[in-house]
Amino acid sequence: MKELIKKQFLGLELVDVEYNHFINTILNSFKLSGLTINIMSLNLTALKRFDKEFKYFIDEFDYTTADGKGLIIFSGLLGDKIQNHLSIPRICDILIRKCYQENKKLFLLGAKTGINKSAVINIKKKYPGINIKGHHGYFDLDNMNHIEDELTRYKPDVVLVGISSPKKERVILKFSSKYHRSINVACGGYIDILSGLIDKSPSIFHHTGMEWLYRFYKEPKRMFGPMFLNGFFFLFYIFPKALVSKYIFHKNPRLIDILDINNFN
């Protein structure tokens, strides 16, 4: 089996292959080992909240994907050019279809109770007979034994965790230390999309890398901070420092140095 190609972006290791190669590789690896595979994503706006814990997530998760064309564009100026934008919603779409085709068990963890139930119902309508269960995402991280017990009883092959950061990453690392026979994806607001609460962006926005614009159009108040303020933080703080490091001091720029992570509390 071929190893997945990975590229360095500001010292962070990201997967750089096309969708089918990525999905087939992790499914084959899962079939052979039956052990946990944890997947998360990185985009430019996420760099604003980069700290020791975020770095810990990237180190601990098996794969981090480049989710966003902005990151793809800037990668060529700051290191190896990343060629493949791997959107988490599209990865999840493919995994759900694979669960249906291969009679695998799917578990949706996240969102409010009603939204989670609507997402489960919509998936069952699209894929009649699919083996799926769900649970809302409103629980205490220190008191989630019931979640771990439910996963152990149900034995899902794929778990999609639709909770906001950093809780979703914490949840995945916690339950996967006890139930370690699933592919787990930190998918953020994806369950809201499955439920119909939020429209999925048309394919043209995905192929042109403008999904962020569609999301801003649909939810301008909620998305203004994460997209524009955090985007400006990258563009006018992280990016200039990275350019200076690379082209003036001839050092490979690392986010850990740019943000002086060693001084973080």
Image (spheres, rainbow, N blue to C red):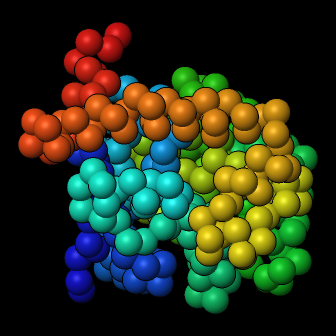
The x and y percentages for residue 253 are 21, 40
Q: Can you see residue 219?
A: yes
Looking at the image, is 5 positioned above or below residue 249? below
The x and y percentages for residue 256 are 25, 31
Screen quadrant of the N terminus: bottom left
Residue 122 placement: quadrant: bottom right
* Residue appearing at x 55%, y 23% in the figure: 142
User: 244 or 177, which lies in front?
Assistant: 244
Question: In screen coordinates, is 90 left or right of 127?
Answer: left
Question: In screen coordinates, is 178 left or right of 200?
Answer: left
Residue 204 placement: quadrant: bottom right
The x and y percentages for residue 262 are 23, 18
Furthest residue in direction front, as rendered? 248
Furthest residue in direction left, as rendered? 250
* Residue appearing at x 36%, y 38% in the figure: 239
Looking at the image, is 45 positioned above or below residue 83? above
Screen quadrant of the C terminus: top left
Furthest residue in direction bottom, as rendered? 101
Question: In screen coordinates, is 100 left or right of 120?
Answer: left
The x and y percentages for residue 32 are 31, 79
Tally the marks.
0
Q: Can you see residue 182?
A: no
Residue 15 placement: quadrant: bottom left
Looking at the image, is 109 positioned above or below residue 251? below
* Residue appearing at x 64%, y 89% in the figure: 101
User: 213 or 248, which lies in front?
Assistant: 248
* Residue appearing at x 66%, y 61% in the figure: 210
